[in-house]
């Protein structure tokens, strides 16, 4: 099975309990519960603002990771990864 990542924050969604919800309450497999609830995004922000929000969790991520990274390394990776996520694709291409 292909691993799912939130198409807003990039968080791995290895369990259906992490899925966001559509307006009708149905699970939304594109976005996590922290980014998308009841059919809408929880936070209105730019991709850069989302990267800054996610960067505050680097230490938590490092706890379970084989390869540790600094905040700056994580931000650099997110700047490469996020433009390919569904929420940011159009913004990154200028559309």
Image (cartoon, rainbow, N blue to C red):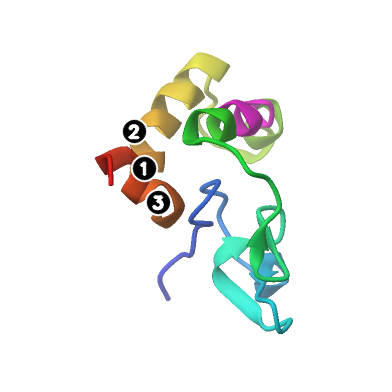
Look at 46% across and 19% down and name the residue there. Answer: 73
Up-down relation of residue 45 to residue 56 (above or below): below
Q: Secondary structure at mark 1?
A: helix
Q: Earlier along the polypeptide chain: callout 2 or callout 3? A: 2
Up-down relation of residue 60 to residue 35 (above or below): above
Q: Is residue 94 magenta?
A: no
Q: Which residues are magenta?
A: 52-58
Up-down relation of residue 54 to residue 68 (above or below): below
Does the CB distance between marks 2 and 3 fall below 8 Å? no
Q: CA distance from mark 1 to mark 2?
A: 14 Å
Q: CA distance from mark 1 to mark 3?
A: 10 Å
Which residue is at the front of the view, 82 or 88? 88
Look at 71% across and 84% down and name the residue there. Answer: 24
Q: Which residue is mark 1?
A: 91
Q: Give the numbered dot on residue 20.
A: none
Q: CA distance from mark 2 to mark 3?
A: 10 Å
Q: Which residue is mark 3?
A: 85
Up-down relation of residue 11 to residue 70 (above or below): below
Outermost residue to the front: 95
Disc 2: CA contacts within 10 A as few (<14), some (14-19) or many (>=20) = few
Q: Which residue is mark 2?
A: 80
Give the label, 1 or 2, closer to the camera: 1
Q: Position of residue 22 (x, y in %)?
A: 65, 76
Which residue is at the front of the view, 59 or 89? 89
Look at 50% across and 15% down and name the residue there. Answer: 72
Q: Position of residue 90 (x, y in %)?
A: 33, 49
Q: Secondary structure at mark 3?
A: loop
Q: Earlier along the polypeptide chain: callout 1 or callout 3? A: 3
Q: Secondary structure at mark 2?
A: helix
Q: Is residue 57 magenta?
A: yes
């Amino acid at each position: 099975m292909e691993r799912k990542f939130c198409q807003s924050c990039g968080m791995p969604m290895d369990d259906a309990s992490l899925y966001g919800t559509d307006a009708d309450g149905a699970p939304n497999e594109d976005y996590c519960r922290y980014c998308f609830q009841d059919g809408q995004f929880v936070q209105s922000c730019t991709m850069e603002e989302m990267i800054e929000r996610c960067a505050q969790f680097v230490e938590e991520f490092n706890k379970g990771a084989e390869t540790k990274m600094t905040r700056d390394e994580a931000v650099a990776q997110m700047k490469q990864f996020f433009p390919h996520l569904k929420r940011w694709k159009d913004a990154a291409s200028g559309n």
